[in-house]
Image (cartoon, grey):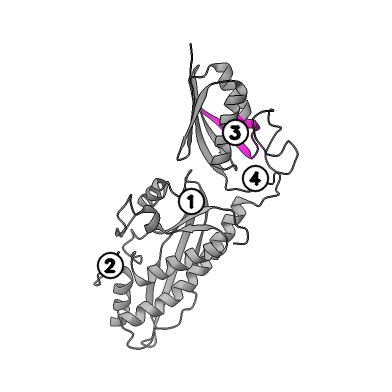
Amino acid sequence: MTRLRMLLLAVLIGVGFSVSATDSAQAQGLNMLVMGEDADEDSVARGNRIFNRVILALGEEMNVRGFNVFDETAVALNITQPNRVRRRDAELIDVSRAVQNPPLDVVVVFQIYASARDSSYSDVVRPAVRIPGRMLNVKTGQMIGSFEVSGLELPPLPVDCERECLLETVGDNARVLATELADALAVKLEGFVGTPGEPALTVVAPSGTGDTGASSGAVGTECGGLPTAYVIKMDGFDTTEITALEEYMNAYSCVQSARPVRASSRSAEYWYETRSDSARLNRNLRLTLEHMGVTGQVQFSGNTFVISKIATR
């Protein structure tokens, strides 16, 4: 292995150099976090100059496409150490779910791999950069899409290219690839979300639920959001009331399914899939209790709704 190739690998994966970690077409209103996974020792470490250029390019492309991109350090500063490196995907997902303000919808996780190939006929060294990325629904963990970009034929490194030269040369190529990755992921996300104007999976809502969605057969103009799921727990209701609540929930516009997880004579739990946002669902649940004439409370945290009946003598 040539000295230049060894230097390149050292610069990119953090061997031999200390890396300071301190140092769309249709806007859907989705809150997004872009995070780098660098647990693999062969990947470019967080805090590296190349890593920083890639995460900025990814975030900016998503931003101009209409998604709300938040800075990880800014939103997670009070709940995690901002200078951690070599983090696994489990840690990244846990951090994204722990962030409450703002509530996050999508996390984009990427990795950066870089290497160098010696020519068989000369001392020419060609760098290679590969950036895989994937998107997850923060609330449910559902895979939204993935893509990988790589440079087919990157320019050879200049003769006597030292550390500064390597960082800038490889960084230039990585930034371009990051923009291409963001473009592909944005297309996948927009296709996954859907666009307003598509037929909504709705039925006629019982009168008085407060739901403003489309009736059966109508075109739902407000059901173009990210498909998500909530856990809805009912506590203290009798069987008749639980049945009525289930009928109302299945009548809300934008609903996709309401699957029972557990049930008893006084409580029930549902896995509720919908394209409606949490604010609208919270309002519909409160108005449903009012319409049923039941005194109760609706509590919401993360992706869980707890509906509790307040019994009186």
Residue placed under numbered mark 1 in the picture: 136
Cα distance between the residues tagged 3 and 2: 49 Å
Question: Does label 3 or label 2 sit earlier along the sequence?
Answer: 2
Which of marks 2 and 4 precedes in the sequence?
2
Q: Amino acid at mark 3?
A: Asn
Q: Label 3 crowding class (10 Å Cα cut-off): few <14, some 14-19, many 20+?
A: many
Q: Amino acid at mark 2?
A: Ser
In this view of the protein, can residue 239 be seen by the observer? yes
Viewer-proximal residue among 109 and 115: 109
Magenta residues, as a range?
249-261
Q: Which structural element holds mark 3?
A: helix
Find residue 284 and name its label: 3
Relative horizontal placement of residue 214, taking residue 231 as reference (left or right): right
Disc 2 vs disc 1: Cβ atoms closer than 8 Å? no
Where 51 falls versus 96 (above or below)?
below
Of label 1 and label 3, which has the lower sequence position? 1
Residue located 60% across and 48% down the image: 225
Say which of 94 and 13 sits in front. Answer: 94
Mark 4–mark 2 distance (CA, rounded to whole Å): 45 Å
Q: Position of residue 299 (x, y in %)?
A: 47, 32
